[in-house]
Amino acid sequence: MSVSPVSIASQGAKPRVDGRRLRSERTRRNIIEAYLELLRRNPQSPTSAQIAKKAGVAVRSVFERFSDLAALTLATADYAIAEGQAAAAPRDVDGDRPARIASHVRTRAAACESWSPLWRVMLTTEQQVKELHLRVVMARQANIARMRLMYEPELASLAEPEREQLLIAMATMISFESWDQMRDCYGLSSEGAQAVWRAAIDRMLPATPQSASRA
Protein backbone atom coordinates (compact mmCIF):
# COMPACT_ATOMS: atom_id res chain seq x y z
CA MET A 1 0.00 0.00 0.00
CA SER A 2 1.41 3.36 -0.99
CA VAL A 3 1.62 6.21 1.53
CA SER A 4 1.19 9.75 0.33
CA PRO A 5 3.79 12.43 1.12
CA VAL A 6 1.07 14.38 2.91
CA SER A 7 0.38 11.55 5.37
CA ILE A 8 4.11 11.09 6.05
CA ALA A 9 4.53 14.81 6.72
CA SER A 10 1.51 14.87 9.00
CA GLN A 11 2.88 12.01 11.10
CA GLY A 12 6.04 13.95 11.92
CA ALA A 13 4.42 17.33 12.30
CA LYS A 14 4.04 18.97 15.71
CA PRO A 15 0.46 19.46 16.93
CA ARG A 16 -0.85 22.82 15.87
CA VAL A 17 -1.59 25.29 18.64
CA ASP A 18 -5.29 26.11 18.84
CA GLY A 19 -5.26 29.84 18.29
CA ARG A 20 -8.86 30.31 19.31
CA ARG A 21 -8.31 28.49 22.61
CA LEU A 22 -5.26 30.64 23.35
CA ARG A 23 -7.22 33.80 22.59
CA SER A 24 -10.05 32.63 24.83
CA GLU A 25 -7.64 31.90 27.68
CA ARG A 26 -6.02 35.29 27.21
CA THR A 27 -9.43 36.97 27.33
CA ARG A 28 -10.30 34.99 30.47
CA ARG A 29 -7.12 36.14 32.17
CA ASN A 30 -7.73 39.74 31.10
CA ILE A 31 -11.19 39.61 32.68
CA ILE A 32 -9.79 38.26 35.95
CA GLU A 33 -7.05 40.90 36.05
CA ALA A 34 -9.55 43.64 35.22
CA TYR A 35 -11.76 42.45 38.07
CA LEU A 36 -8.81 42.54 40.47
CA GLU A 37 -7.75 46.00 39.35
CA LEU A 38 -11.24 47.39 39.87
CA LEU A 39 -11.44 45.84 43.35
CA ARG A 40 -8.13 47.47 44.28
CA ARG A 41 -9.41 50.85 43.15
CA ASN A 42 -12.80 50.63 44.84
CA PRO A 43 -13.93 48.32 47.67
CA GLN A 44 -17.36 47.98 46.07
CA SER A 45 -17.75 44.95 43.82
CA PRO A 46 -17.70 46.10 40.18
CA THR A 47 -20.53 45.38 37.76
CA SER A 48 -20.16 43.10 34.77
CA ALA A 49 -20.26 46.17 32.50
CA GLN A 50 -17.39 47.80 34.42
CA ILE A 51 -15.35 44.60 34.28
CA ALA A 52 -15.96 44.18 30.56
CA LYS A 53 -14.98 47.79 29.84
CA LYS A 54 -11.78 47.46 31.88
CA ALA A 55 -10.89 44.19 30.13
CA GLY A 56 -11.67 45.64 26.72
CA VAL A 57 -14.32 43.05 25.88
CA ALA A 58 -18.08 42.87 25.46
CA VAL A 59 -20.22 41.97 28.49
CA ARG A 60 -21.25 38.76 26.76
CA SER A 61 -17.59 37.72 26.68
CA VAL A 62 -17.54 37.85 30.48
CA PHE A 63 -20.53 35.53 30.75
CA GLU A 64 -19.27 33.23 28.01
CA ARG A 65 -16.39 32.38 30.34
CA PHE A 66 -18.05 32.75 33.76
CA SER A 67 -21.62 31.77 34.53
CA ASP A 68 -22.01 34.68 36.95
CA LEU A 69 -19.95 37.06 39.08
CA ALA A 70 -19.68 34.46 41.87
CA ALA A 71 -18.00 32.12 39.38
CA LEU A 72 -15.67 34.95 38.39
CA THR A 73 -14.81 35.53 42.05
CA LEU A 74 -14.04 31.83 42.47
CA ALA A 75 -11.79 31.80 39.40
CA THR A 76 -10.08 34.96 40.63
CA ALA A 77 -9.51 33.34 44.03
CA ASP A 78 -7.79 30.40 42.32
CA TYR A 79 -5.70 32.84 40.28
CA ALA A 80 -4.74 34.74 43.44
CA ILE A 81 -3.80 31.57 45.31
CA ALA A 82 -1.53 30.47 42.46
CA GLU A 83 0.04 33.92 42.13
CA GLY A 84 0.45 34.23 45.87
CA GLN A 85 2.18 30.86 46.18
CA ALA A 86 4.56 31.74 43.36
CA ALA A 87 5.46 35.07 44.95
CA ALA A 88 5.76 33.81 48.52
CA ALA A 89 8.49 31.19 48.38
CA PRO A 90 9.84 30.78 51.95
CA ARG A 91 12.99 32.79 52.60
CA ASP A 92 15.39 32.89 55.54
CA VAL A 93 14.02 29.63 56.92
CA ASP A 94 17.51 28.91 58.32
CA GLY A 95 18.06 32.43 59.61
CA ASP A 96 18.14 33.55 63.21
CA ARG A 97 14.95 34.50 65.02
CA PRO A 98 14.83 38.19 63.97
CA ALA A 99 15.61 37.31 60.34
CA ARG A 100 12.87 34.68 60.21
CA ILE A 101 10.30 36.96 61.79
CA ALA A 102 11.19 39.85 59.47
CA SER A 103 11.06 37.63 56.38
CA HIS A 104 7.75 36.07 57.34
CA VAL A 105 6.13 39.42 58.13
CA ARG A 106 7.44 41.02 54.94
CA THR A 107 5.97 38.20 52.84
CA ARG A 108 2.67 38.26 54.68
CA ALA A 109 2.38 42.04 54.40
CA ALA A 110 2.97 41.89 50.63
CA ALA A 111 0.18 39.32 50.30
CA CYS A 112 -2.19 41.45 52.35
CA GLU A 113 -1.43 44.58 50.35
CA SER A 114 -2.03 42.74 47.09
CA TRP A 115 -5.00 40.54 47.88
CA SER A 116 -7.02 42.21 50.68
CA PRO A 117 -9.60 43.72 48.27
CA LEU A 118 -10.34 40.28 46.83
CA TRP A 119 -10.39 38.75 50.31
CA ARG A 120 -13.19 41.10 51.38
CA VAL A 121 -15.32 39.98 48.45
CA MET A 122 -14.56 36.33 49.16
CA LEU A 123 -15.76 36.71 52.74
CA THR A 124 -19.04 38.29 51.65
CA THR A 125 -19.65 35.55 49.06
CA GLU A 126 -18.33 32.38 50.71
CA GLN A 127 -21.60 31.43 52.37
CA GLN A 128 -23.35 31.34 48.99
CA VAL A 129 -20.57 29.49 47.15
CA LYS A 130 -19.28 26.32 48.82
CA GLU A 131 -16.17 26.18 46.65
CA LEU A 132 -15.30 29.74 47.62
CA HIS A 133 -15.58 28.88 51.31
CA LEU A 134 -13.08 26.07 50.69
CA ARG A 135 -10.65 28.60 49.18
CA VAL A 136 -10.98 30.77 52.29
CA VAL A 137 -10.20 27.76 54.48
CA MET A 138 -7.24 26.83 52.26
CA ALA A 139 -5.79 30.33 52.53
CA ARG A 140 -6.07 30.30 56.31
CA GLN A 141 -4.51 26.86 56.55
CA ALA A 142 -1.65 28.01 54.32
CA ASN A 143 -1.01 30.87 56.74
CA ILE A 144 -0.62 28.40 59.61
CA ALA A 145 1.53 26.06 57.51
CA ARG A 146 3.91 28.94 56.76
CA MET A 147 4.27 29.69 60.48
CA ARG A 148 4.96 26.03 61.26
CA LEU A 149 7.84 26.22 58.79
CA MET A 150 9.25 29.61 59.80
CA TYR A 151 9.03 29.07 63.57
CA GLU A 152 9.71 25.35 63.86
CA PRO A 153 12.48 25.72 66.53
CA GLU A 154 10.27 27.73 68.85
CA LEU A 155 7.10 25.71 68.25
CA ALA A 156 8.95 22.44 68.86
CA SER A 157 9.36 23.41 72.50
CA LEU A 158 5.57 23.38 73.01
CA ALA A 159 3.34 20.37 73.58
CA GLU A 160 -0.14 20.07 72.17
CA PRO A 161 -2.61 21.69 72.56
CA GLU A 162 -0.49 24.76 73.42
CA ARG A 163 1.26 24.70 70.04
CA GLU A 164 -1.99 24.65 68.09
CA GLN A 165 -3.52 27.34 70.29
CA LEU A 166 -0.53 29.59 69.70
CA LEU A 167 -0.68 29.06 65.94
CA ILE A 168 -4.38 29.92 65.84
CA ALA A 169 -3.79 33.07 67.90
CA MET A 170 -0.90 34.15 65.67
CA ALA A 171 -2.84 33.39 62.49
CA THR A 172 -5.69 35.58 63.71
CA MET A 173 -3.25 38.34 64.61
CA ILE A 174 -1.67 38.41 61.13
CA SER A 175 -4.89 37.93 59.20
CA PHE A 176 -6.08 40.04 56.27
CA GLU A 177 -8.62 41.57 58.64
CA SER A 178 -5.85 42.60 61.05
CA TRP A 179 -3.91 44.21 58.20
CA ASP A 180 -6.99 46.14 57.09
CA GLN A 181 -7.51 47.50 60.60
CA MET A 182 -3.93 48.69 60.94
CA ARG A 183 -3.80 50.27 57.50
CA ASP A 184 -7.34 51.64 57.12
CA CYS A 185 -8.59 52.23 60.67
CA TYR A 186 -5.37 53.22 62.44
CA GLY A 187 -3.63 54.80 59.45
CA LEU A 188 -0.36 52.92 59.82
CA SER A 189 2.09 52.79 56.94
CA SER A 190 3.05 49.40 55.58
CA GLU A 191 6.32 49.50 57.50
CA GLY A 192 4.55 50.66 60.64
CA ALA A 193 2.07 47.80 60.43
CA GLN A 194 4.88 45.32 59.82
CA ALA A 195 6.67 46.62 62.92
CA VAL A 196 3.55 45.91 64.98
CA TRP A 197 3.42 42.35 63.67
CA ARG A 198 7.14 41.73 64.20
CA ALA A 199 7.01 42.88 67.81
CA ALA A 200 3.84 40.91 68.55
CA ILE A 201 5.16 37.68 67.02
CA ASP A 202 8.41 38.02 68.92
CA ARG A 203 6.52 38.43 72.19
CA MET A 204 4.17 35.51 71.49
CA LEU A 205 6.76 32.94 70.44
CA PRO A 206 8.52 30.85 73.08
CA ALA A 207 12.24 31.38 73.58
CA THR A 208 14.42 30.03 70.79
CA PRO A 209 16.29 26.94 72.04
CA GLN A 210 20.06 27.37 72.22
CA SER A 211 20.48 24.19 70.21
CA ALA A 212 18.53 25.82 67.38
CA SER A 213 20.85 28.81 67.04
CA ARG A 214 21.05 29.51 63.30
CA ALA A 215 23.38 31.39 61.01
Image (tube, rainbow, N blue to C red):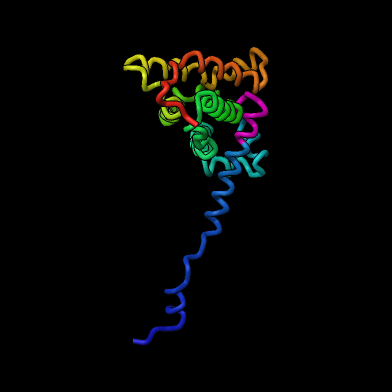
| Numbered label tally | 0
Residue 91, horizontal then vertical, whole percent: 52, 34
Examine the structure image and report whether residue 44 is included in the region drawn in magenta. Answer: yes
Q: Quadrant of residue 169?
A: top left
In this picture, which residue range is highlighted in magenta? 35-45
Q: Nearer the viewer, residue 9 or 207?
A: 207
| The N terminus: image quadrant | bottom left
- Answer whether residue 75 is visible to the viewer in this image: no
> Is residue 149 found left or right of 179 in the rendered image?
left
Residue 197, horizontal then vertical, whole percent: 56, 18
Residue farthest to the bottom?
2
Residue 83, horizontal then vertical, whole percent: 53, 38
Provide the major secondary structure of the magenta segment: helix
Residue 5, horizontal then vertical, whole percent: 45, 83
The residue shown at (52%, 61%) is 17
Q: Quadrant of residue 147?
A: top left
The residue shown at (65%, 34%) is 50
> Is residue 134 found left or right of 18 in the rendered image?
left
Q: Nearer the viewer, residue 198 or 208?
A: 208
Q: Nearer the viewer, residue 26 or 141?
A: 141
- Answer whether residue 6 is visible to the viewer in this image: yes
Examine the structure image and report whether residue 91 is included in the region drawn in magenta. Answer: no
Residue farthest to the left?
160
